[in-house]
Image (cartoon, coloured by chain):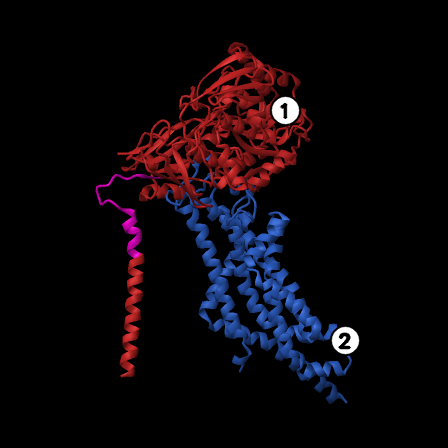
Chain colours: A red, B blue
Amino acid sequence: MIKNKKFIMILSAIMVFALVLSACGTKPAEEGEPTGDKAVKDTLVIAQGADAKSLDPHATNDQPSSRVSKQIYNTLVESTVDMELVPGLAESWNQVDETTWEFNIRKGVKFHNGEELKASDVKFSIDRMLASKKVAHIVEAIDSVEVIDDYKVIIKTKEPFGPLLAHLSHTATSIVNEKAVTEAGENYGQNPVGTGPFKFVSWEAGDKITLERFDDYYKGPANVKTVVFRNITEGTNRTIGLETGELDIAYEIEPIDKDRVANHEKLQLIEGPSLSMAYIGMNNQKEPFNNEKVRKAINYAINVDDIITAVLNGAGQKANSPIGPRVFAHNDALKPYEYDPAKAKELLKEAGYENGFQTTIWTNDNPVRMQIAQIVQAQLKEIGIDVAIEPLEWGSYLERTAKGEHDMFILGWVTVTADPDYGLYALYHSSQHGGAGNRNFYTNEEVDKLLEEGRTAIDPEKRTEAYKKAQEIIVNDAPDVLLYYGTQNVGAQKSVKGFELHPAGHHSVYGVSFE
Amino acid sequence: MTSNVAKGTMTVEKKKNKKRSQWAEVWRRLKKNKMAMLGLAILTILVLTAIFADFIADYDNVVIKQDLVNKLQGPSAEHPFGTDEFGRDIFARMIHGARVSLRVGILAVGISIIIGGTLGAIAGYYGGKLDNVIMRVMDIFLAIPSILLAIAIVSALGPSLMNLMIAIGISSVPSYARIVRSSVLSIRDQEFIEAAKAIGANDLRIILKHIIPNALAPVIVQGTLGVAGAILSTAGLSFIGLGIQPPAPEWGAMLATGRPYLRYAWHVTTFPGLAIMITILALNLVGDGLRDALDPRLKQ
């Protein structure tokens, strides 16, 4: 009898357990297909190689964060995929005088928290950018923002500033809601509120960010209901994710995987130009890189074509200037340094380094940069320069190159605004030494003057002239080794329609739909 | 008188004979173990390739020579194991990689045996408070996973061959300290130690001459197995970029760089992976064989 009781108890316990288990098992499946087989897919899963740092657009200026922020926020001015400037949150604008701009704010634009966009939010946002160490350099030309009425602001610049509109199209100048920022305080980066087509839902750090369609978006609701940004570090895993159908879009397909995606029956490879430029920086204030001949020797000793073929599988264009052909005032008359080890050796000899020297090259653990470092190491060995490769963690890499502790380093620069001011001023003006961008610690008074001229002039022709001259001097001084202008690619399911690559690297998914 | 002298020399000879025969006995038992002999054969080949690596493949002109046009080529007569992402010969790199792996393995274990052995011997011989202090510190070390400890040390000192050996060596000190301490404890109270004390031998002499030789067997076994562990740790640290720096070849690093090409060029990861596997297997076989051969309970 007792035995029987025990048996029944155990049996019922097992049954309860099984029930609970099966309930757990079926739940996700039910959620996945709420409306049966014929339902149109409405969740867009995107993978990129790193997690966002912050969704507060004024707290960071890095690509992974911008790619997500772009969906949540709008800027006053927007740049199209052809790098044309069109009205964004500002309906129209006109320049009152050399330093005064009037912006008319679009009426009836709602923030995700229900608030309406007012001129006060614009002023609040720009003041906030100016106070932020991370993005202030983008708007530093702005002197003051004045609210005229609810839908009109006047922006005054310190001195005439030609590229103002281009700068106001940068994702770091996204307009935030004053109330939301004040309410969230320190946690705003994890609780963003914008005017964009998607609103923030949740963020599992290191894993994924979920966004949801904002139905009151001023251009009309987006096509897909949910957008998920996943963090998949390994390029190979992103490709595999596409193949298994787990991902709809994968950013930055590794060069070696490109053909596989392009030839896959269910996938498409979307390629396009980018505004990025990769370069090897040198510390111009440190021996022996303070010697122009040494820098030129290194330029002659590095075979950039080899790097493009071997590392990028040909997906790059050899750089002849710090700014690419898609950037305004690119100087196409400049000739890049050709591979000429004999000449390099001769220059080294003239500089007094006949037997070469020892140096280090820093890189972060980006696989493309690691490979470039190894090729450069081998090529410089040919002319007697002994290079040690030192990989650094991204944070300390930026910090220590900003302090000038380096010899050589590999970095890239994206001229987000497609205006030469963004691409040249920060990288080569002597006031920008260190963290602002001039990690070469390059100084040339003439270049300084030309860059200031290009920045303050409003007349496009004058600007072009100043910038072309500046590029010429910079390339001749060889403060760094210019490598290549990158291209960008995205792998996607063939069923994904309407995805457009933005040359700045952050793509809006507002227009994306499923077939 | 004369017979007395003769007797004296005879006993000395007998002693020597006995000593020699103890190791001969171990060798005889080891020889019976076929798997251990297989491991030993593989190890011998490895050691020889490491020593004569320069004769097999020139470092500057083959091992680190890039040939970007011929990158990721499959195995062929010219490149028996194919080429890597820079067009370098994988076979040549593996041979020079053996040198790095064996050197790091042996030296790292050497470092941990010297430090761990000394600490363990002191702790075991003196006992009491000193024992407590040393062994509790070792316990703290043991509480940290050894690979994490090694990562921390390498990150602090900076990645280089020397630092790698120090890091791996230090992270396995506690296990040697424990082994030595326990065997010292079992020997300390034996009569011949008492006898040595009675005739006035000092502590240093007793530890070096009487205790350490008798506590050696378990250390040898642990050491052989430890070399395998150290090689694996080196490969692991190199895999995550904390080991040998480019362009020097190392098996773990070769494995890591081949990862993105796994689906296109299998040979880039397969051969270094096999090399690691076979080496570890050989070391483990020898270690196991030695343990059986040295085990005093099996003594005839």
Residue behind mark 2 = B202
Lateral position of residue A165 relative to residue A409, left or right = left
Observer-nearest residue: A82 or B91? A82
Residue A472 horizontal/vertical position (percent):
57, 16
Q: Is residue B17 above or below residue A37?
A: below
Provide the residue span drawn in magenta: A25-44
Q: Is residue B201 above or below residue B72?
A: below
Return the chain for callout 2. Answer: B
Residue B37 horizontal/vertical position (percent):
48, 67
Confirm whether circles 2 and 1 share one chain: no
Examine the structure image and report whether residue A78 is included in the region drawn in magenta.
no
Q: Please, what is the three-letter code of the amino acid marked with disc 1?
A: Leu
Lateral position of residue B36 relative to residue A197, left or right = right
Residue A325 horizontal/vertical position (percent):
47, 20
Q: Quadrant of residue A208?
A: top left
Whether residue B214 is visible to the viewer of this picture, yes or no, is no
Which structural element holds mark 1? helix
Q: Quadrant of residue A237?
A: top left
Residue behind mark 1 = A347
Return the chain for callout 1. Answer: A
Q: Residues within 10 Å of mark 1 (few under 14, many from 20)?
A: many
Q: How many marks?
A: 2
Disc 2 + disc 1, Cβ < 8 Å: no
* Residue found 61% across the figure and 70% down from its top: B178
Residue A503 horizontal/vertical position (percent):
43, 26
* Residue found 50% across the figure and 70% down from its top: B289
Q: Please, what is the three-letter code of the amino acid marked with disc 2?
A: Asn
